[in-house]
């Protein structure tokens, strides 16, 4: 079952004519004939969850916007395409292959929440994708799909595309808004949340572009149709970026709740027929699952019940030859490099634990190091401004708990060290 | 009103007040670095985490606004662990160079380590290195390694002084405070960043390595630098006379007064303490015709009889009095009693000359750089008793209409420049009274040492008419006496003369 990637094999899908020939912008047309409240009701019915990582129900997010009669004035929708999590690359493929699908979703969201300006914030490093998206915006503007009186209806909406400055943290909604305002992308301390205090302090809905791209299909075929595809609590499909030790890495779309086994099979299985050691289900900041989780349905709630997160569906497969301490070091190094530096636990905790891990891997481990890492992780978890800061502690704790013997082996200068060291 | 439970105790507060402020009013000090009542609450230091019933995790109390029914604990084991944990993270890359750090003794890291930290350090890695000694301006030294990135200084310079010299540069653990390109931290309020820095990252170049803060005594007083009258505390070093370059006054810090200066003072006021140990008068002297040291009694009687003679010969117009707005309210009262009521003088000059006028701005600084012209105005100086223009005073002296001059704490070189010695030379009597000799003191027949504001109790009335008292922070220099006692002494001397 494919929704978003259904026509990805069309070579010229990024062109407006091809996209419209395949039924594109029909969802927008139908949406403009509906009332915004009806669209919101369909979205609520669809059980669409935010696909950027948190899995917050999209309908519920719209519900937290202040009513327009109470807070009049502009409000915004921002499509988040600052995909920077290691292991996640589906938005890159998506925007490059089917930019109009994202724009259509953005326009529907704008119409549904009463926004007259929509934004796409695209990762700074995505140069080619930015150019494709800009070409699509120009085409849509020329065709009257963006601008005044869209498709003859009374709805007018502008779309702006902004490029990030190259930070991981900008992928977080409040940091993204700061970056859009021209500031250093430091996350804001909620509350208030963006739906009440967003871009320029105005009500703003921030959605991942994949979430937005689901909207045309929900409008076109109905919320119930969409809800039936997934699990009872997560409607529709999920785009997985599968990478690591698999034969056929790539972007795979499956209904919510697909098993890890089925996903691995689609990706050609573990490379060279080796045994599976671990699977990171949602990008590097999510705790790893093990071979025992092969039959775990991949949806937000099931993965969460196993102590991990579905995240943005960045599935990284690690085979039996992988050194998990090195994996952990690489992830913490990444988080150290990308820590925004605003709050202390993340800024100091990440570099401290990274140094400890590097020392352990260089053969200078000490018996007390695992306990020290555990303690440092405990000091970071739950005390940071944003969820990405928390990640440092969560990841450390997870690897320490799941692979204690590997950490122990690195904990003495004479310790037995596995011969291989793989980087993610 | 919101009724909340704080550590099991019912507390009432206005709706929407920040929890950290409510706790403070209720006597519960929650540790914090980044929060400052005048500079907002970015919530980045994470020291003020508290437990709120129903919240999924610990919440920063500087960001939470109280609501009715809130149940808060600042003492639970989870809070204690989190706060001590945050402190450990603040300190992992801190250089711990307390023995050579000027903040030592008044450092937020030291204080919280002793109150909520007390953990055993487990940091064995190499610490991060940044610039240790960066003079960011003429008055402030930056040590990037000691910084805990609370951004108070950045916010002060953005929101209060609006000069934007410092910013946060770099990212993550490489993040550090630094000068914005092309800027120097030399605005008139730059010293405040040192006060608000909770650690030793920003130190005062003037105070660096002078004296350890635990040897200082603190006195609450009022700044004499201009007519604003900022609340300050004067820090003095008298316990170890060989410290602080053998100077008694060590520094001035602002004192919170919401009605006058808020949390801030200007740099002019901050460094004005230096005058307290420079060119001070401590001896009662007769300089002309020959130099002789006098007792106060002898001086009172000699000066008052000389004045008496002058007034008898030439009338009350012949003696002019020059005063400065540095007199206290008490001084002004005795001043009036002596010169107006008793000696019946009519020629007074007390307007600020150009040398006492300076820069003014919307924040604190006032144009007239004397603290208490209003105290004189309250007694009629300025209204009933007009100040002679400086030029006409000079003319009257040149024309011989004025034959004597009584100068109270005023350096006439600041008014008349090089003309001054020529003007004073022909006078029959010149009395100089003041804490500093200036150049005028040398030209007087009698030189009477007065205490400076820091050595007396008194009060100033600021430009708004607000009277503020101050206490002596230091003993007088030598035989110096408060101005009002000198006036009263002369009054008694004159009476005694009459009785003869």
Image (tube, rainbow, N blue to C red):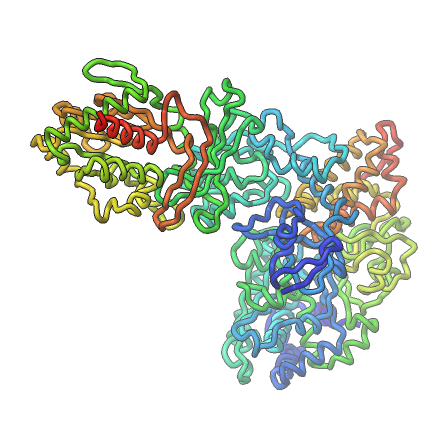
Percent across and percent down for residue A423 are 77, 43
Question: Which quarter of the figure has residue B488?
Answer: top left
Q: Residue furthest right?
A: A292
Considering only vertical position in the picture, is A354 above or below B125? below
Question: Which quarter of the figure has residue A108?
Answer: bottom right
User: Residue drawn at (77%, 49%), measured in percent from left and top?
Assistant: B76
Considering only vertical position in the picture, is A281 above or below A57? above
Frontmost residue, A324 versus A133: A324
Instruction: Give the total of numbered labels.
Output: 0
Query: Which part of the image, by quadrant, shows the N terminus of chain A?
Result: bottom right
User: Residue drawn at (31%, 21%), measured in percent from left and top?
Assistant: B297
Percent across and percent down for residue A28 are 62, 79
Percent across and percent down for residue B490 are 27, 29
Percent across and percent down for residue A360 are 80, 34
Question: Which quarter of the figure has residue A170?
Answer: bottom right
Is A349 left, or right, of A248 in this rendering?
left
Frontmost residue, A321 versus A378: A378
Frontmost residue, A237 versus B179: B179
Is B179 left, or right, of B294 in this rendering?
right
For the question of whether residue B306 can be seen, the reply is yes
Frontmost residue, A339 versus B146: B146
For the question of whether residue A122 can be seen, the reply is no
Is A388 left, or right, of B106 in this rendering?
right
Is A138 left, or right, of A276 in this rendering?
left
Q: Residue furthest front?
A: B499
């Amino acid at each position: 079952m494919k929704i978003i990637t259904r026509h990805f094999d069309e070579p010229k899908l990024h062109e407006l004519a091809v996209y419209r020939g395949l039924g594109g912008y029909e969802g927008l047309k139908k949406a403009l004939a509906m009332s915004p409240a009806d669209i919101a009701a369909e979205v609520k019915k669809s059980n669409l969850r935010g696909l950027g990582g948190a899995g917050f129900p999209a309908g519920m997010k719209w519900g937290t916007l202040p009513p327009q009669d109470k807070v009049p004035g502009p409000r915004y929708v921002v499509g988040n395409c600052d995909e920077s999590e290691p292991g996640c690359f589906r938005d890159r493929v998506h925007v490059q292959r089917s930019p109009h699908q994202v724009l259509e979703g953005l326009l529907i969201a704008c119409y549904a929440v009463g926004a007259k300006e929509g934004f796409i914030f695209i990762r700074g490093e995505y140069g080619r994708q930015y150019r494709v998206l800009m070409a699509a915006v120009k085409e849509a503007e020329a065709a009257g799909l963006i601008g005044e009186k869209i498709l003859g209806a009374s709805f007018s909406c502008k779309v702006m595309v902004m490029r990030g400055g190259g930070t991981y943290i900008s992928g977080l909604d409040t940091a993204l808004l700061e970056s859009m305002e021209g500031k250093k992308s430091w996350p804001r301390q909620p509350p208030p949340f963006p739906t009440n205090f967003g871009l320029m302090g105005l009500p703003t809905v921030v959605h991942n572009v994949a979430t937005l791209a689901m909207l045309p299909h929900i409008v076109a075929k109905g919320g119930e149709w969409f809800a039936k595809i997934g699990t009872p609590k997560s409607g529709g499909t999920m785009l997985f970026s599968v990478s690591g030790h698999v034969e056929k890495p790539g972007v795979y779309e499956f209904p919510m709740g697909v098993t890890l086994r089925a996903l691995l099979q689609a990706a050609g299985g573990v490379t060279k027929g080796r045994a599976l050691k671990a699977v990171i289900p949602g990008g590097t900041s999510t705790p790893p699952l093990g071979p025992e989780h092969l039959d775990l349905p991949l949806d937000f709630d099931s993965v969460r019940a196993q102590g991990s997160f579905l995240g943005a569906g960045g599935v990284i497969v690690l085979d039996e030859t992988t050194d998990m301490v090195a994996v952990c070091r690489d992830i913490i190094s990444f988080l150290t490099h990308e820590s925004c530096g605003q709050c202390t636990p993340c800024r100091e905790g990440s570099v401290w634990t990274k140094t400890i891990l590097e020392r352990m891997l260089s053969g200078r481990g000490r018996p007390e190091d695992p306990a020290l890492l555990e303690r440092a992780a405990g000091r970071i978890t739950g005390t940071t401004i944003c969820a990405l800061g928390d990640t440092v502690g969560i990841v450390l704790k997870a690897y320490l708990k799941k692979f204690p013997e590997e950490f122990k082996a690195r904990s003495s200068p004479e310790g037995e060290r596995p011969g291989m060291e793989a980087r993610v | 009103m919101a009724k909340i439970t704080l550590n099991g105790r019912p507390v009432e507060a206005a709706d929407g007040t920040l929890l950290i402020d409510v706790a403070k009013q209720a006597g519960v000090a929650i540790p914090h670095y980044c929060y400052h009542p005048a500079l907002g609450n970015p919530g980045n230091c994470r020291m003020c985490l508290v437990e709120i019933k129903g919240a999924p995790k610990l919440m920063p109390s500087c960001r939470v606004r109280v609501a009715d029914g809130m149940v808060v604990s600042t003492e639970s084991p989870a809070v204690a662990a989190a706060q001590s944990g945050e402190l450990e993270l603040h300190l992992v890359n801190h250089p711990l160079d307390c023995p050579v750090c000027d903040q030592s003794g008044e450092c937020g890291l030291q204080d919280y380590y002793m109150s909520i930290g007390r953990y055993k350090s487990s940091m064995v890695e190499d610490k991060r290195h940044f610039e240790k000694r960066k003079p960011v301006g003429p008055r402030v030294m930056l040590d990037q390694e000691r910084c805990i990135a609370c951004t108070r200084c950045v916010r002060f310079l953005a929101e209060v002084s609006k000069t934007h010299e410092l910013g946060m540069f770099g990212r993550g653990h490489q993040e550090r405070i630094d000068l914005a390109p092309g800027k120097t931290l030399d605005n008139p309020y730059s010293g405040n960043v040192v006060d608000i820095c909770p650690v030793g990252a920003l130190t005062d170049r003037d105070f660096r390595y002078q004296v350890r803060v635990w040897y200082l005594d603190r006195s609450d007083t009022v700044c004499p630098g201009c007519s604003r009258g900022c609340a300050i505390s004067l820090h003095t070093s008298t316990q170890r006379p060989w410290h602080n370059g053998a100077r008694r006054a060590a520094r001035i810090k602002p004192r919170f007064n919401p009605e006058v200066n808020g949390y801030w003072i200007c740099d002019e006021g901050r460094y004005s303490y230096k005058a307290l140990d420079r060119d001070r008068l401590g001896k009662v002297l007769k300089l002309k015709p020959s130099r002789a040291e006098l007792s106060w009694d002898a001086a009172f009687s000699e000066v008052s009889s000389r004045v008496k003679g002058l007034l008898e010969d030439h009338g009350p117009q012949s003696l002019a009095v020059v005063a400065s707005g540095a007199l206290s309210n008490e001084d002004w009262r005795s001043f009036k009693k002596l010169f107006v009521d008793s000696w019946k003088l009519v020629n007074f000059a007390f307007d600020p000359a150009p040398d006492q006028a300076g820069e003014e701005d919307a924040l604190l600084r006032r144009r007239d750089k004397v603290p208490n012209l209003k105290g004189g105005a309250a007694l009629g100086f300025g209204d009933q008793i007009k100040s002679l223009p400086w030029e006409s005073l000079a003319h009257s002296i040149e024309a011989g209409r004025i034959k004597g001059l009584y100068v109270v704490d005023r350096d006439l070189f600041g008014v008349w420049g090089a003309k001054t010695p020529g003007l004073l030379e022909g006078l029959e009597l010149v009395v100089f009274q003041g804490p500093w000799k200036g150049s005028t003191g040398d030209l007087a027949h009698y030189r009477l040492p007065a205490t400076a504001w820091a050595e007396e109790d008194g009060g100033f009335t600021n430009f708004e008419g607000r009277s503020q008292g101050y206490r002596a922070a230091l003993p007088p220099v030598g035989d110096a006496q408060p101005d009002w006692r000198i006036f009263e002494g002369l009054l008694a001397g004159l009476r005694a003369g009459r009785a003869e």
